[in-house]
Image (spheres, helix red, strand yellow):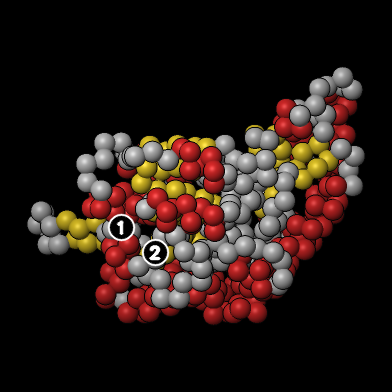
Amino acid sequence: MPMPERGRPWPELAAEMEAMRAGDLDWRRGRHGAYVWYASDDLEHVLREAFGMFLVENGLGIRVFPSLARMESEVLETVADLLGGPGAPGIFTSGGTESIFLAVAAMREWARATRPGLQRPGVVAPHSAHPALDKAAHYLGLEVRRVPVGPDFRADPAAMATAIDGQTIGLYASAPSYALGMVDPIAELGQLAAARGLWLHVDACVGGILGPFVRELGYPVPPFAFEVEGVTSVSADLHKSGFAAKPASTVLFRTEAHREFARFTFSDWPGGTYSSLTFTGTRPGGAIAAAWAAFQFLGREGYRELAGASMRARAAIESGLRAIDGVRIHGEPQLFAFAWAAEGVSMGRVAAALAREGWVAARTTSPDGIHVMATPIHERYADEYVAAAARAVAAARAAAGPALERPAAYN
Ligand SMILES: Cc1ncc(COP(=O)(O)O)c(C=O)c1O
């Protein structure tokens, strides 16, 4: 579409953009199993205002924007505190993928400095790890060795230990994994990493901010961050369970020296020394401001409420699903993400039937299932989801016929 010769008034554009939204995912009615983390209209208002206030400012020039510098360091200090590592140095990034990229980049540089001469450095990870790891490894020239998870769908430390070889530089685990919502056994993996002299990155992109509050409410969430010796870096997204505006995430490191391995510095150009800890150059001031405002507006009390609402949403959806004939939840997830399946039917058919009713039903493949990321808004729509799921399972059963074999996941 060529640019219009003459500009158009905002009200006309706003109306056109509003109309464009008609076909979008209806997240205000909780139809999402992914993509959106929404807390309340009040918080949405605060995020818009805060983002708007710093819309033009650029986080690349943090030195000339002491406001952004202060907000960024306060956010990072808060996250370090939540992750059991008060004072742990961090980087404010554009999302989980950038946070993981920087952790893996730092891991590689650390290995280059401490173990020079490795020919094909690699990372050992459970099969459940998010593809952001492989994306990072792809760009950084590292090998990822994925190891099957245990029968509980968590990382299997013994299998990971077996996969370590002389070229392994680090281990990777999740808290929780995206697909099935499992918190990996970080304490055991921390011991393994420490014993073998490896870097351990914990991908807490989903659970990093809200997980500690879920634990505070009395749910059994094991330590998954810097409380565990042997954890070298942790990524925690502000734009997921921190309920901040996109794009915003954090990656924290055990020590300043570890964080420095993420730094890129270059001087051989006419602009002097360029030195940066992030992958991106220009960074949205609005995202930093909105994250700071979210923490201050909600406080610990607000996050505890969001944690409670997320867990109640999960419980309501789970118990409704379990009442559907043949439905089971995969494993025992500890946070707000989980996956379910119905015996004797193709979950692809179930997901398609849900999608026809407007629900985003992300699939899991091993085992076959449908992923749910329960957020506070889902508490309100749990019954509608369960009813739609029951219709979808019935439709899939009718389509499949009674002779269908049980899927491999149940063998
Ligand atoms: C566990 C986990 N890690 C990393 C990511 C990547 O995050 P982003 O999409 O913000 O880059 C996701 C995204 O869903 C995730 O669930």
Q: Which residue is identified by label 1?
A: 262
Is 252 left or right of 258, judged from the image as shown? right
Q: Is residue 44 above or below residue 189?
A: below
Residue 182 at x, y = what percent? Answer: 63, 51
In the orientation shown, which residue stands out farthest toward the front?
A: 195
Find out whether the residues at labels 1 and 2 contact each other: C-beta distance under 8 Å: yes
Q: Residue at x 71, y 41 (%)?
A: 370
In what quadrant of the picture does the N terminus appear?
Answer: top left
Q: In the depicted view, which residue is nearer to us: 211 or 390?
A: 211
Q: Residue at x 30, y 36 (%)?
A: 120
Q: Residue at x 20, y 58 (%)?
A: 265
Is 178 left or right of 326, judged from the image as shown? left
Q: Decide which of tag 1 and tag 2 comes sooner along the chain.
A: 2
Return the mark for residue 83. none
Residue 375 at x, y = what percent? Answer: 68, 60
Q: Amino acid at mark 1?
A: Ala
Alpha carbon distance from label 1 to label 2: 10 Å
Q: Residues within 10 Å of mark 2 (few under 14, many from 20)?
A: many
Q: Which residue is identified by label 2?
A: 253
Q: Amino acid at mark 2?
A: Phe
Corner quadrant of residue 65: bottom left
- Mark 2 lies on a secondary structure that is strand
